[in-house]
Image (spheres, rainbow, N blue to C red):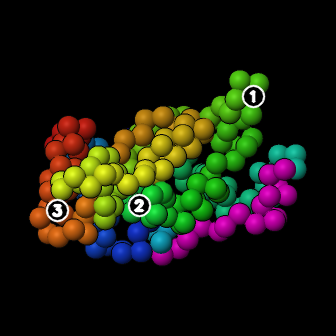
């Protein structure tokens, strides 16, 4: 492994729960691959462009990867292509991904470039690589809360699995930290559970 791409999506910055845990994922990867470099992109601080009319026209026209309207998309795709592992630190916003992560996805999931349309459906054009997604949530979505409150809807994890599979990335792993706004005990428990899972994936 030579390059790790690290995307952070929380407006909470370095103190965000997702960011703290994702830092640990990167640390584990670098222990296993000491020569690896980390390319970091803070999507919350520098949000990707929203798809506009010029972008739409460019992707509907015959393929032209040098089109000015696709320059930002090309840069983000090249960054993704260059990495051997992708780490994403994200909160769950209203049951799904935050707007900045959706904006990044809309830039990198592009017909003729990262996926092809075939008679059998969409086919990913990127080589697979591990994707580690750290998700922080104030509530519980993988199951009921410790007090028995039913889980909230989860459109984040199935969406990311589906959209990454569209471009060829199928090795997607989720570390979920739930109930992190419900007091220090819940937050500590969430970190403890995530660390156990991480150790199973990437032994120190």
Task: State the image quarter where residue 5 is shown.
Answer: bottom left
Q: Nearer the viewer, residue 86 or 18?
A: 18
Q: Earlier in the sequence, mark 2 or mark 1?
A: 2
Residue at image position (41%, 69%) is: 10
Bounds of the magenta segment: 45-60
Q: Residues within 10 Å of mark 2 (few under 14, many from 20)?
A: many
Q: In the drawing, does residue 92 fall left or right of residue 66?
A: left
Q: Residues within 10 Å of mark 3 (few under 14, many from 20)?
A: some
Residue 128 magenta-drawn? no
Disc ID at residue 118: 1
What secondary structure is marked by label 3?
Answer: helix
Q: Nearer the viewer, residue 154 or 176?
A: 154
Q: Residues within 10 Å of mark 1 (few under 14, many from 20)?
A: few
Disc ID at residue 19: none
Q: Earlier in the sequence, mark 3 or mark 1?
A: 1
Q: In the drawing, does residue 26 fall left or right of residue 38?
A: left
What secondary structure is marked by label 2?
Answer: loop
Q: Position of residue 199 (x, y in %)?
A: 18, 42
Disc ID at residue 186: 3
- The residue pinned by badge 2 equals 92
Residue that sits furthest to the right in the current view: 61
Residue at image position (31%, 70%) is: 16
Task: State the image quarter where residue 67 is shown.
Answer: bottom right
Give the quadrant of the C terminus.
top left
Look at the numbered discs 2 and 3 and tell me whether their residues touch, using CB distance below 8 Å. no
Give the quadrant of the N terminus.
top left
């Amino acid at each position: 492994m030579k390059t790790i791409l690290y995307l952070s999506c929380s407006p909470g910055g370095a103190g965000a729960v997702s960011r703290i845990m994702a830092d640990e994922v990167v640390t584990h990867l670098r222990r296993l691959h000491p020569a690896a470099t980390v390319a970091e992109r803070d999507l919350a601080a520098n949000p990707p462009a929203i798809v506009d009319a010029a972008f739409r026209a460019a992707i509907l026209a015959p393929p032209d990867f040098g089109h000015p309207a696709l320059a930002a998309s090309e840069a983000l795709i090249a960054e993704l292509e260059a990495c051997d592992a992708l780490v994403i630190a994200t909160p769950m916003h209203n049951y799904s991904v935050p707007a900045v992560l959706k904006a990044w996805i809309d830039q990198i999931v592009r017909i003729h470039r990262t996926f092809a349309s075939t008679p059998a459906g969409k086919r990913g054009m990127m080589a697979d690589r591990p994707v580690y997604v750290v998700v922080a949530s104030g509530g519980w979505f993988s199951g009921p809360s410790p007090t028995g409150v039913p889980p909230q809807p989860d459109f984040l994890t199935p969406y990311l699995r589906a959209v990454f599979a569209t471009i060829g990335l199928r090795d997607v792993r989720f570390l979920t930290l739930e109930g992190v706004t419900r007091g220090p005990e819940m937050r500590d428990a969430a970190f403890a559970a995530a660390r156990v899972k991480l150790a199973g994936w990437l032994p120190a």
